[in-house]
Amino acid sequence: MREKTIEIFLFIDALGWKIVNDHDFLPELLPSRKKINMQFGYSSSAIPTILSGRFPAEHGHLGLFRFAPESSPFKGLSCWNWLFKPEGFWNRGRVRHHLSKMIKKIYGFTGYFQLYRMPVWKLKFVDYCEKRDLFVAGGMENIPNLYDVLSKKGVNFHISDWHLPDKENYAAAEKAIEKGKNFLFVYTANFDGVLHDKAGDFAAVQNKLAEIKDHVTHLFAKAGEYAKNVHFTIISDHGMTPLTGTVDIMSKIEKSGLVFGRDYGACYDSTMARFHYLNGHAQSVITQIMKEFPGHFLSEDEEKRYGIYRSDRAFGEGIFLLEPGIQIVPSDMGSKPLNGMHGFAPEDEHSFAAILSNTDLPAWVNHVADYFNLMIERAGQL
């Protein structure tokens, strides 16, 4: 055997604690398990949190877009507004997909980039958080990421290519084991997509988990061919909350008489609206309007507790979080609701993430941000 120990961390997007227990997922293979507090937000905040151990307030990633006219990289697109009419044509899914690919190439973005439903005319007012590939060397600029730290420590590691489908990443992990890698971070995202579509469908979720179980047991067996000890740990970032209703915040604000970019700025995510007030009147009007919707503006104490408070208010001067299950439709993310969504209050029963392992888990691992130090600690023991 080439290596005495192989350490595998498998990231399964959206494998929430409730799902793990409802479906009794892999109790024999991975008996050590804990409920984990999720980071606030979506994958755009989860991935950099996992890869750095830092909270959004420090790494700067919350929603994909943020209102920031002064730093928008898209100002040059404003002279092409005439090209993107009629707006209806450019809101088609396939058209938006190809437009996103074109803009990504033009601007040289290497990270995950997707326009979703963000209107083209608004782009000159917004910045985008994930311009760089977070998984590679220097991917988080001045903050060391997993790749940077493992490289510095001289660990013989493998990190998945997030661009690839899950099956290819499982296959790549097996090849990495064959090549002698003894620390693996395996990235899979498909389960998240299944839950967005099938949340609440017990049979569909069970079938997908059975497929994942096959991949896990096969990868575990492959590692066992090359190592006496195989430490296998599954980590997740959040769960999935079933849809219970929708609200149209965007239309209400737009009909108020306030002008976007002059009176206010806003980013409408699926579960929260993030406002910037450019004058006192706008703040008063928006605050009054939002009383009609099921949710609340986060207090400063809540923002600090969730790790998203910034004195520069980069994420928004007012962050309105909806009640669990309620989605903003339409939003900058889509024109239709999804059967499941995450990004609600971390305390919601569907929000909690999970960690499952065949080795003992330290008492200090309680938050998604703790995964990073656990991975570094385990890598240092190889």
Image (cartoon, grey):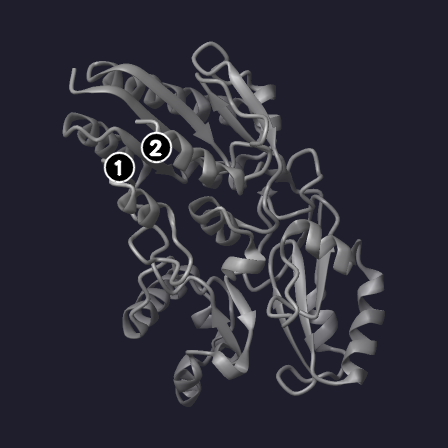
- Residue at x 80% of width, y 65% of height: 290
The answer to which of 97 and 313 lies nearer the viewer is: 313
Q: Looking at the image, is 132 positioned above or below residue 17?
A: below
Q: Position of residue 84 (x, y in %)?
A: 42, 80
- Residue at x 41% of width, y 33% of height: 377
**Crowdedness near tag 2: few (<14), some (14–19) or many (≥20) residues, C-alpha within 10 Å:** many
Query: Where the N terminus falls, by quadrant?
Result: top left
- Cα separation between marks 1 and 2: 7 Å
**Crowdedness near tag 1: few (<14), some (14–19) or many (≥20) residues, C-alpha within 10 Å:** some
Q: Position of residue 339 (x, y in %)?
A: 59, 42
Q: Looking at the image, is 8 positioned above or below residue 337?
A: above
Is residue 298 among the parts visible in the rendering?
A: no
Q: Tell me which corner region of the image, top left, top right, bottom left or bottom right, holds residue 23.
A: top right
The answer to which of 332 and 314 lies nearer the viewer is: 314
Residue 155's label in the rendered image is 1
Amino acid bearing label 2: Ala
In the image: residue 269, left or right of residue 81: right
Is residue 141 among the parts visible in the rendering?
A: yes
The answer to which of 31 and 245 lies nearer the viewer is: 31
Give the residue number, with chain letter if any, for mark 2.
379
Amino acid bearing label 1: Val
Are discs 1 and 2 less than 8 Å apart at CB? yes
Q: Judging from the image, what secondary structure is the residue with disc 2 in?
A: helix
- Residue at x 47% of width, y 76% of height: 120
In the image: residue 159, left or right of residue 36: left
